[in-house]
Structures are given as structure tokens and as C-alpha cells.
Image (spheres, rainbow, N blue to C red):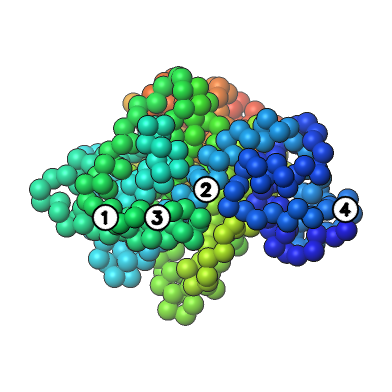
């Protein structure tokens, strides 16, 4: 019997990543297990039956031949569900702030001690995600390592800024019911917002469970009207087990990705006509060991929210010839040596121009198959932070790619807030063959470089 409605197909897509294709369980148990253990807000039609040949909407026969182990099925499913919703809410929040920043110029951009920017969006996302996670799992059970703190916001001359953050957080939490999340009974006060931000003060480590949050990754891209990401990962005993990456400006048409430094112009042109004509924004997610990474389109504010959202599986590119590959790297040469990667690209015969993208959108591009290699070689002495990489690593790996340091070692998330012991830089590739070639090329070029 065919799957009878596109809605059913969408639900199957959404649920599919929770089922690793490892061991076999009878599909007849699918709806009841879901109802009992997984997603209480979802209505599953128990009469769904899958045929091995028929396809409806975007659901394929393969999508439907679900194999899973009920133990694995339960693990992290609730955490993933809440994390995806929280990141989705955060993306909508960021969109509003970015639009205000670009079109009304009424969002103040602050400078941190290291001269990097921070905005209302960074603090507001941190507060919102912290609040959503605490509500879902209980404050005492939630430990978060995150980028922002409350030092600036707590200053006596920051009242206006704190009020703006509080307003932004409350606007976002007012949307919580659209995601099946209960909003606060009354809007959060400024001190509750400060509390939610400052609770994200875990320092990580090798044991136990903690979340890692970069509320706005690529804040520079954000303030320039360009790419940025909201990144949330769950780490258990030093290993990232869940990764969720919201990319509000990720274009569905890959050609737009390479439109460097011009999003502001695209945005202004499109918004004056119809912002819907630029199809952009997604949330990607994966669970370690599930063998799948998934992408949901970002809900459009113009349309009525329909949750659960549909999702489709993403996979890395199959290109393993460096001559045909595209590599991406940070926009700012202060953050990664462009001259080293240019030499390396030349040495392996990379013909395409580098794709310079702000934020963990670079990880998203590899996972989605829009680019094949990501390299970041920060200046000596700079210590990479775990929140700049954790979510992206899980998603790329589950989409079929490889992420290591330049020595070929996995990134280490178990030694605090920094990626301690990182060998030279970070390399992500769409597959092992390409990865090896890049690592060999790095070795060959390293000694002659000035890094
Ligand atoms: N000097 C230096 N070297 C390397 N990396 C640095 C450096 N300074 C900052 N950061 C971190 O880089 C994050 C932004 O990385 P991107 O890849 O987006 O860089 S770029 O803006 O595209 O150049 C950025 O993340 P956000 O602060 O969340 O934007 C920083 O954590
Ligand atoms: Mg960051
Ligand atoms: Mg950040
Ligand atoms: Mg920052």
C-alpha cells in the first residue's frame, strides 16, 4: 500500500534519523514505539504501511525500509528533538535581528576584548537556548559550555542593551508553542535572562554530559548581512554525540553560496521585491553513529508554522579528485592563512576558486555536498574553541565525511573549552581518499611555510 499523503512522507523523513540502520526491528512496531518513547507531540498514523517499490512525495523505498535497534532508538532522541527546536527558534530570532541590523540599523554592535563583534542576537540566542534546554530537562540536569557571558550586559550603562536582549528573548519564547514547547507563564525578567545566559558556564571536560553552544557563529558575517550559524552539540564523556547547525542564510541554490560579500545587496534587492524569492535557511542535524545527517528547511515567517517540519537526508559529495574539488575556508585571513591554503591548493591541483564563507556554514557546505574540503589554519598561539566545531564535526561525519586535525587525529572535545592538542589546523573532507591527499599535501608544504 502506498504512503497516502505527502504529510506522512514528511513525518517519515523527520523521524528517519532517529533510526540507525544497524540492527533489524520489525517495522510493525514503528508507530507504537514512537508513540511510547520518542516524540509525544507527533501524531503518527498507525496504519502506515510501506511498500518496497512505491514512492510518494520525496519518500523513497529506502527511506521506508527502516531498520533499527530499540535501545539505540531511544538514545538521545528527546535531546535531539529539543535541540532541533531550540536551534530553529534561535534561527528565527537571528533573522529578525539581522533584518533590523541591516535595514533599520537599530541594532548596536559591541566589541569584545579581542575586538570581535557581539550583538543582541548572540546574547538572546544563548538565553533562549539555555531556557529551552533547562525547561525540557530541568535546570539541575543541564550543563552548557557557551561563548557569551554577562559581563557587558550587567554593567550599569548597559540597561538599554539588556532591555533589548530581554525583549528579543521574550519575542522568541512567545513563538515556542509553534514548536510544541510551553512558553514561560510570564515574560522573562531581565534578571531571568541574565540567569539563563550565565548558567552556560560549564567548562566541559572528559566525563559526563554537557551541551556546547555557539549562539551566533560568524558574528562578523552576521553583522555584514552575510552567512552565520547557530551551533549546538551534545557531548557525552568527551565525544560529541549530537550536532545541530542552524544556517539561516544558507541558500538552497548552491550557486548563491559563492556570492561573496554581496548578501547585503541581495537581501536589500530581494526584500524590496519579495524575500521569499531567495529560498534560503536550513537546520541540519545528526546523531553520532546513526549513519545519517538531515536537513530541514527553515520555517518562513511569511507562512504559518507547521511543526513537525519535513527533513531530507544530506550526503557529502562523491568527488575525490582534488582537481575537481572546491575547498572552503574562513573569510578573514586573520583567522586562517589564505596564503598557506592557496599554496596547498595549487600543489594538489585544485582548480576551483576557494569558497570563503563565514562560520560553520563551511561544515554545512561539506555535509550538503556543496564543497569537498574545509581547511582552517589559525595563526600560531590561537586556540580553537570547541563550540566553533563540535556540531559541524558530527554532521559532516554522519553525512559521510571526515574531520581531523592536520595530523589526521580526531578533534579532542574532552579537555575543556579549547580543542587542546590540535596539530596545526583543521581539515574536513568529503571522504577518506581526498582527506589523505590533503593531509599528505599539508605535510609536504608545512616546513616551507611561515606558519
Ligand atoms: N584570530 C582568530 N583565529 C582563528 N579563529 C578566530 C580568531 N578569532 C576568532 N576566531 C573564531 O573564529 C570564529 C569565526 O570563524 P570563521 O570561520 O567564521 O572566520 S571568518 O569570520 O570567516 O574569517 C569566531 O566565532 P564567532 O566569535 O562565534 O563568530 C571565533 O571563535
Ligand atoms: Mg564561533
Ligand atoms: Mg559566536
Ligand atoms: Mg564571537
Camera-nearest residue between 115 and 81: 81
Q: Is residue 234 left or right of residue 216?
A: right
Residue 166 marker: 1
Q: Find the distance from the CA under tag 4 to the CA under tag 1.
A: 50 Å
Q: Which mark is residue 51?
A: 4
Q: Toward which corner of the image does residue 450 lie, by quadrant? A: top left
Query: In whole angstroms, how far apart are the C-alphas of marks 1 and 3?
Result: 14 Å
> Between disc 3 and disc 2, whose residue precedes?
2
Badge 3 marks a residue whose secondary structure is loop
Residue at figure coordinates x 75%, y 44% from the top left: 30
Q: Are marks 1 and 2 in contact (CB under 8 Å)?
A: no
How far is disc 4 from disc 2 in space, using C-alphas?
Answer: 30 Å
User: Where, quadrant-wise, is the C terminus in this rendering?
Assistant: top left
- At label 2, counting other C-alpha atoms closer than 10 Å, the crowd grade (few under 14, some 14-19, many 20 or more) is many
Q: Which of marks 1 and 4 precedes in the sequence?
A: 4
**In whole angstroms, how far apart are the C-alphas of marks 4 and 3?**
40 Å
Camera-side residue of 173 and 214: 173
Instruction: Report the front residue among 436 and 169.
Output: 169
User: Which residue is label 2 attached to?
Assistant: 84
* Number of on-image labels: 4
Ligand 4 shown in quarter = top left
Q: Residues within 10 Å of mark 4 (few under 14, many from 20)?
A: some
| Residue 442 can be seen in this image | no
Sequence-earlier tag: 4 or 3 = 4
Q: Respond yes or no on whether mark 2 lies under 8 Å from ligand 3.
A: no
Q: Is residue 188 above or below residue 278?
A: above
**3 or 2: mark nearer the eye:** 3
Near mark 1 (Cα within 10 A), the count class, few <14, some 14-19 or many ≥20, is many
Please indicate whether residue 325 sits to the left or right of residue 27 in the image: left
Which quadrant is the N terminus positioned in?
bottom right
Amino acid at each position: 500500500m502506498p504512503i497516502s499523503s505527502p504529510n506522512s512522507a514528511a513525518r517519515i523523513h523527520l523521524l528517519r534519523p532517529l533510526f540507525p540502520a544497524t540492527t533489524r526491528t520489525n517495522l510493525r512496531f514503528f508507530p507504537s514505539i514512537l508513540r511510547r518513547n520518542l516524540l509525544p507531540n507527533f501524531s503518527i498514523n498507525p496504519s502506515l504501511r510501506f511498500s518496497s517499490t512505491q514512492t510518494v512525495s520525496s519518500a523513497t523505498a529506502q527511506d521506508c525500509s527502516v531498520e533499527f535497534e530499540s535501545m539505540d532508538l531511544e538514545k538521545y532522541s528527546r535531546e535531539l528533538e529539543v535541540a532541533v527546536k531550540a536551534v530553529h527558534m534561535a534561527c528565527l530570532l537571528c533573522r529578525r535581528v539581522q533584518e533590523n541590523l541591516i535595514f533599520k540599523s537599530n541594532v548596536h554592535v559591541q566589541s569584545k576584548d579581542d575586538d570581535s563583534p557581539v550583538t543582541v542576537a548572540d546574547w538572546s540566542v544563548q538565553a533562549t537556548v539555555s531556557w529551552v534546554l533547562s525547561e525540557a530537562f530541568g535546570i539541575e540536569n543541564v550543563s552548557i559550555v557557551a561563548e557569551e557571558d554577562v559581563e557587558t550586559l550587567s554593567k550599569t550603562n548597559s540597561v538599554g542593551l539588556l532591555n533589548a536582549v530581554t525583549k528579543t528573548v521574550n519575542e522568541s519564547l512567545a513563538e515556542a508553542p509553534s514548536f510544541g514547547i510551553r512558553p514561560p507563564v510570564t515574560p522573562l525578567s531581565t534578571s531571568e535572562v541574565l540567569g539563563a545566559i550565565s548558567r552556560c558556564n560549564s567548562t566541559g571536560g572528559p566525563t559526563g554530559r554537557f551541551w556546547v553552544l555557539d549562539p551566533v557563529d560568524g558574528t562578523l558575517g552576521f553583522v555584514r548581512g552575510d552567512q552565520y550559524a547557530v551551533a549546538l552539540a551534545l557531548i557525552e564523556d568527551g565525544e560529541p554525540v549530537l550536532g545541530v547547525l542552524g544556517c539561516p542564510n544558507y541558500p538552497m541554490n548552491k550557486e548563491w553560496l559563492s556570492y561573496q560579500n554581496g548578501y547585503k545587496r541581495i537581501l536589500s534587492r530581494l526584500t524590496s521585491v519579495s524575500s521569499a524569492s531567495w529560498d534560503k535557511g536550513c537546520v541540519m542535524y545528526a546523531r553520532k553513529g546513526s549513519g545519517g545527517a538531515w536537513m530541514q528547511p527553515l520555517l518562513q515567517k511569511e507562512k504559518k508554522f507547521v511543526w513537525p517540519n519535513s527533513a531530507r537526508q544530506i550526503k557529502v559529495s562523491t568527488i575525490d579528485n582534488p582537481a575537481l574539488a572546491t575547498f572552503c575556508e574562513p573569510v578573514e585571513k586573520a583567522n586562517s592563512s589564505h596564503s598557506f591554503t592557496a599554496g596547498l591548493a595549487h600543489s594538489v591541483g585544485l582548480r576551483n576558486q576557494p569558497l570563503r564563507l563565514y562560520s560553520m556554514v563551511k561544515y554545512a557546505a561539506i555535509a550538503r555536498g556543496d564543497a569537498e574540503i574545509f581547511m582552517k589554519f589559525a595563526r600560531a598561539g590561537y586556540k580553537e574553541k570547541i563550540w566553533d566545531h563540535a556540531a559541524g564535526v558530527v554532521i559532516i561525519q554522519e553525512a559521510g565525511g571526515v574531520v581531523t586535525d592536520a595530523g589526521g587525529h580526531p578533534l579532542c572535545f574532552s579537555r575543556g573549552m579549547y580543542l587542546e592538542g590540535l596539530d596545526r589546523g583543521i581539515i574536513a573532507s568529503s571522504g577518506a581518499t581526498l582527506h589523505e591527499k590533503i593531509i599528505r599535501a599539508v605535510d609536504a608544504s608545512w616546513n616551507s611555510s611561515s606558519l
